[in-house]
Amino acid sequence: MKKIIIVFSGIILLFLLLTVILSNHSDDPDEVRDFRIAYQKDYRIYAVPIPDSIAFAGELVPLPRQDLRERLDRELLITTYQHSQTMVALKRSKRFFETIEPILKKFHIPDDFKYLAVAESNLSNAISPSNAVGVWQFLKATGIKYGLEIHEEVDERYHLEKSTEAACKYLLDSFRMFGSWTSAAASFNRGQQGFSDALNSQDEASFYDLYLNEETSRYVFRILAIKTVFSNPKAYGFYLTDEDYYPTVPVSYLSVDSSVTDWVRFSKQQGITYLTLREHNPWIRKMALNNKNRKTYGIKIPEK
């Protein structure tokens, strides 16, 4: 008897569901026809232009190879049609690149590596599933190796200037190891040892000839796609005025070489909120700073 009741109840629920669906469906054939005509006329998705030639950090990509051309095409399509994500990164680019570009120049790193930062984090202080952190997505051990202070109170992976300097040191080491900026970029994703192992085990010298895991295989092409779109946004459907780009906020620096018992109180003393302090100094990770070694920290304070 219970089975009969359950089956009957299911039939009633199905009937009610169909009633709702049918009640929301237009019976007007003209309305359906007009919608289809408008849809076919106005909703279009286009293939995107693929450059005839492109270089990364002065190294020409062998695009005549069809497999490489298709890999670039894939990343161009994704970068173009992930509208909101790409638009947000474009809007952020002026603010972040104004800091990143001079540091790359200081370390003699090609300017194209600013697009690697976009590929890593979309220019945000992201945290990956593997706990890589910040704009440059450093793992803790790698960050420490390249001079970043990382503990529960301070994490300089969130410090844009210092993490950019650490990225430059990493890339210089990689360039010395592999003799190629393209390989240096790939090793930033795969790791220096992992990329070296791939080259040696396959007896190859070029990134473009390696069989790699999908993430690293796509990585350089994603950077190339970002470079292509960011260099000519309008060609890929992104229209921004100068006012659309997020501006750099002028700041002054306050040196702190002692402990801070309460960052909230510290903020109030500077005439700003704790929120503002953390937004401009995301490397601060706790409400206080012990600073037993009396290290000097430069605290950014936005100018009024």
Image: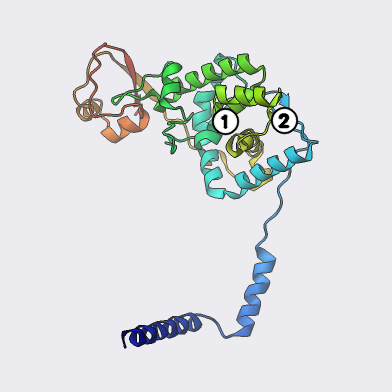
Q: Nearer the viewer, residue 141 or 70?
A: 141
Of the image marks 1 and 2, the number of the one nearer the N terminus: 1
- Hey, which quadrant is residue 124 in on the image? top left
Q: Disc 1 marks which amino acid?
A: Leu
Q: Is residue 234 above or below residue 125?
A: below
Residue that label 1 marks? 116
- For the point 65% across and 47% down, which residue is it? 77
Residue highlighted by disc 2: 209
Q: Position of residue 226 (x, y in %)?
A: 61, 37
Amino acid bearing label 2: Asp
Relative to residue 270, is residue 62 drawn left or right? right
Question: Where is the N terminus found, in terms of image quarters?
Answer: bottom left
On screen, 216 above or below 162? Answer: below
Count up the numbered dots: 2
Q: Which structural element holds mark 2?
A: helix
Q: Quadrant of residue 241?
A: top right
Badge 1 density bin: few <14, some 14–19, many ≥20, Cα 10 Å: many
Q: Residue at x 44, y 80 (%)?
A: 17
